[in-house]
Image (cartoon, coloured by chain):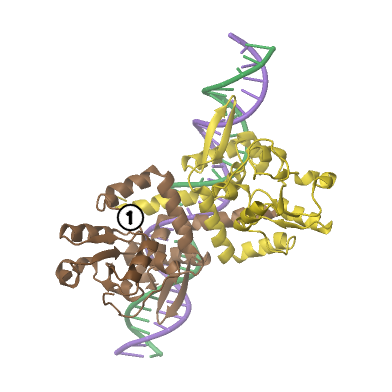
Chain colours: A brown, B yellow, C purple, D green
Amino acid sequence: MTNPKTEIFEQFAELARVLGQGNRLELLEHAAQGERSVERLAQLTGLSPANASQHLQVLRRSGFVRSRRDGKRMLYRLGDGPVIELLGALRRYAEHSRAEVRGIVSDYFNRLDSLEPVSREALVKRLDDGSVALLDVRPEDEFALGHLPGALNIPFADLERRLAELPKDTEIVAYCRGPYCVLSFEAVAALRAKGYDIKRLEDGFPEWKAAGLPVDTAGDSRLS
Amino acid sequence: MTNPKTEIFEQFAELARVLGQGNRLELLEHAAQGERSVERLAQLTGLSPANASQHLQVLRRSGFVRSRRDGKRMLYRLGDGPVIELLGALRRYAEHSRAEVRGIVSDYFNRLDSLEPVSREALVKRLDDGSVALLDVRPEDEFALGHLPGALNIPFADLERRLAELPKDTEIVAYCRGPYCVLSFEAVAALRAKGYDIKRLEDGFPEWKAAGLPVDTAGDSRLS
DNA sequence: TTGTCATTCAATCAATAACTTGACTGATTG
DNA sequence: CAATCAGTCAAGTTATTGATTGAATGACAA
């Protein structure tokens, strides 16, 4: 173990082991949306608070999340290393080589949205043109913690009630928490059925932020 | 567990767990050099054949390696998914956030080569100019399984004896198995001490190949 | 066919990990 | 100050994992 190479591989492996737990990956995705208390993260993932706390500490020890105290709550947010990039590489590898992943993806997601999604690059270009409207279907609190500039926030649950706010003549791009977030898939399916010209952003808010693209945090929820 | 999202995260986690073992990562690095028998891989990593075999099967189940039979030996090589990309993301994350990794790297590696390495992109450009000679310091069998076009192969152990083959007037770029392969670090240190104008390639052969750049497999070991 | 070699399988043991429970700490509120 | 709330810690249980050993397979050669 004094061999430096072995030592390095062991360090890498330790990081991989931290990601080797579904619950932790799920906590990580939620923390990637913005700061969240332990209790909230526990609710979102269905874990017991104690269990969530322990997982979060494991994630913190490896720098995947950071934490700060706010009164009696402890807020966790994503760490500042290239976490999203690592998770993206894991996702891409999984999509390539795990038949199960492809199966689940096509069963549950692609079925809902057979048209190809819009890439981040394409969206940036089209936002410059002003030829597209942005729809954020995440819950309001996640939206408040950060969103794409100019996005309109209508949580998925409120979509039916607030259809009037959506433009019928402009193309809409909907986004969500990440590439596997169901909300945007279902929003696209629902709105397309109603005749809206709508597509899905390939990935979600964390990836956008990680790419260094501008992010709004205030309640600035007008259409661009 | 019927929840598709949980299911997906569990799939991702399973892949991460496979990488969560130092010995497996080391086997993977060796398999990334080219096809290798179980026995050879066991030798290279210091594992027992049975143990190496089991690890290799775990890696195979997740597509990180492929295998084929050749007579009575079983040859393992890297799988064809974006494995190198995933390992690269893991490495970059580790370098960013693990103080231990930075420490080990600076202690054992940077000490040997304080000058910045040459990036793959820069090397491609300079190879077009013909302004640089390529030195592959890996063992001959690894070289034979694949190497950068026009590279001269002098295994590290033979360097002293074969100095005459190296140009004194051209800049040399040395490379090896990967970003943490000691051979190229030491070769650069040794040759620089003897007055050669030599730098290290930032990463190694597997990354070059994964980037889709041309690779020679024959015994074509002339200088470019 | 028999023997040999490389690899895999099966059984075992020790170590590690995840989750639960209940007690504990630290900050806020009455 | 006492009560409460959010989070953490510590101990115990169960399940999984990695390494070892020796036997079993499958390919080849005499």
Question: From the viewer's perspective, is B104 left or right of B76?
Answer: right
The residue at the point 28 percent across, 47 percent down is: A107
The residue at the point 42 percent across, 67 percent down is: A53
Q: Secondary structure at mark 1?
A: helix
Residue A57 in the image, given as x and y percentages of width and height: 47, 66
Question: From the viewer's perspective, is A91 left or right of A156?
Answer: right
Chain letter, disc 1 residue: B
Residue reaching furthest front?
B129
Q: Tell me if I can see residue B9 in this picture.
A: yes
Identify which residue, D13 or B97, lies in the foreground. Answer: B97
- Dividing the picture into quadrants, the one containing residue A146 is bottom left
The residue at the point 57 percent across, 36 percent down is: B76
User: For the residue marked with disc 1, what is the amino acid?
Assistant: Lys
Q: Tell me if I can see residue B46 in this picture.
A: no
Question: Height in image: A221 above or below D17?
Answer: below
Question: Height in image: B28 above or below A58?
Answer: above
Residue A116 in the image, given as x and y percentages of width and height: 31, 53
- Dividing the picture into quadrants, the one containing residue C13 is top right
Q: Residues within 10 Å of mark 1 (few under 14, many from 20)?
A: some
The residue at the point 25 percent across, 65 percent down is: A172
Residue A185 in the image, given as x and y percentages of width and height: 27, 58
Total marks shown come to 1
Residue A218 in the image, given as x and y percentages of width and height: 34, 80
Q: Which residue is mark 1?
A: B5
Question: Height in image: A176 above or below B208?
Answer: below
Identify which residue, A180 or A199, lies in the foreground. Answer: A199
